[in-house]
Image (cartoon, grey):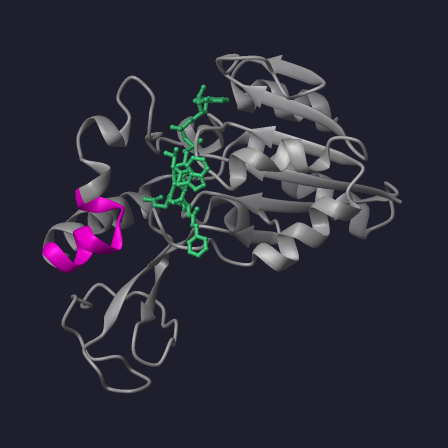
Amino acid sequence: MQRIVVLTGAGISEESGLQTFRGADGLWNHERIEDICTPQGFIRDPLRVDRFYNGLRALLPTVHPNAAHLALAELERAGRERRWDGQVTIVTQNIDDLHERAGSHNVIHMHGELLRLRCTACHATPAWRTDCFPDTACPACGQPALRPDIVWFGEMPYHMDIIARHLAECDLFVAIGTSGVVYPAAGFVDSVAGHADTMLFNLEIPSGPSAFDQAVIGPATRTVPAWTR
Ligand SMILES: CC(C)NC(=O)[C@H](Cc1c[nH]c2ccccc12)NC(=O)[C@H](CCCC/N=C(/NCCC(=O)O)S[C@H]1O[C@H](COP(=O)(O)OP(=O)(O)OC[C@H]2O[C@@H](n3cnc4c(N)ncnc43)[C@H](O)[C@@H]2O)[C@@H](O)[C@H]1O)NC(=O)OCc1ccccc1
């Protein structure tokens, strides 16, 4: 049984029409990380943070999974139906729902999900609704303590124990569409060195010596289906 862990970043959703963070027209070119993607920024100006994520939430119904998302979902299905002796686990840094909409089930959102909220009082994670604002009462405890269920800088990513187990057991680690700048995700390739082969699918070779055994350069909608076929 081949065990594959696939780490995905904003680059896999770029051809679906979702901006990346650091590309030419990246999200971080228009907003300061400190204002939008830190707990301090949310405390300082929750409406501004809400406006930013509502902008992304409004986009989501207008975009669709692309050939790279669909290829990964098909690979998972082939494993489940024993057409291939293997298992795929997707660990995504993305907060969009395109992997699930493509049909993938084994998806771990280490940085949270755009369509979820989290109550800082009772830790419930209700689904986001259009009529939700920072002062909306939590449906579980009634406290006005809801925030986006997104991992911001300085906060511990989700499911790190499950992710660590999958990384320890995998024999192939694949990274797709990520710049390898943000930790702990950027350190996963080093953590599997010695027990797994490693492949990178990206538009460009990241700077510095590549930690990957193999790099496949090009748009993910072309390179990923060619790899899974
Ligand atoms: C900037 C960096 C140096 N800072 C960090 O890493 C920090 C601090 C830190 C921790 N450890 C360290 C070690 C060293 C240095 C710093 C640190 N890390 C943290 O704060 C993390 C949390 C980080 C998570 C922050 N949240 C995000 N996202 C959610 C929000 C949101 O989404 O709005 S990060 C966000 O940026 C990250 C990078 O983005 P990418 O997805 O890689 O996108 P990017 O635009 O950068 O690149 C796109 C790539 O795709 C390629 N591409 C483009 N188009 C295509 C295409 N068509 N096809 C193929 N490829 C393509 C491009 O070539 C490019 O390479 C992703 O993780 C993404 O989720 N938390 C934590 O460490 O907690 C500790 C802790 C421990 C105990 C207890 C408490 C706390």
Residue 135, picture quadrant: bottom left
Q: Where is residue 122 in the image (x, y as percent from the top left)?
A: 35, 81
Q: Can see residue 106?
A: no
Point 49% across, 28% down: residue = 180
Residue 90, picture quadrant: top right
Give the residues in magenta: 35-45
Drawn side of residue 117 relative to residue 80, left or right? left
Ligand 1's quadrant: top left
Q: Where is residue 119 in the image (x, y as percent from the top left)?
A: 31, 73
Which of the pair 128/147 is nearer the observer? 147
Point 72% across, 18% down: residue = 213
Q: Can see residue 141?
A: yes
Drawn side of residue 188 relative to residue 114, left or right? right
Q: Position of residue 13 (x, y in %)?
A: 44, 33
Drawn side of residue 123 relative to residue 223, left or right? left
Residue 194, picture quadrant: top right
* Up-down relation of residue 105 to residue 146 (above or below): above
* Up-down relation of residue 58 to residue 11 (above or below): below
Drawn side of residue 177 relative to residue 112, left or right? right
Is 43 in the magenta?
yes
Point 32% across, 30% down: residue = 19
| Main secondary structure type of the part rendered in magenta | helix
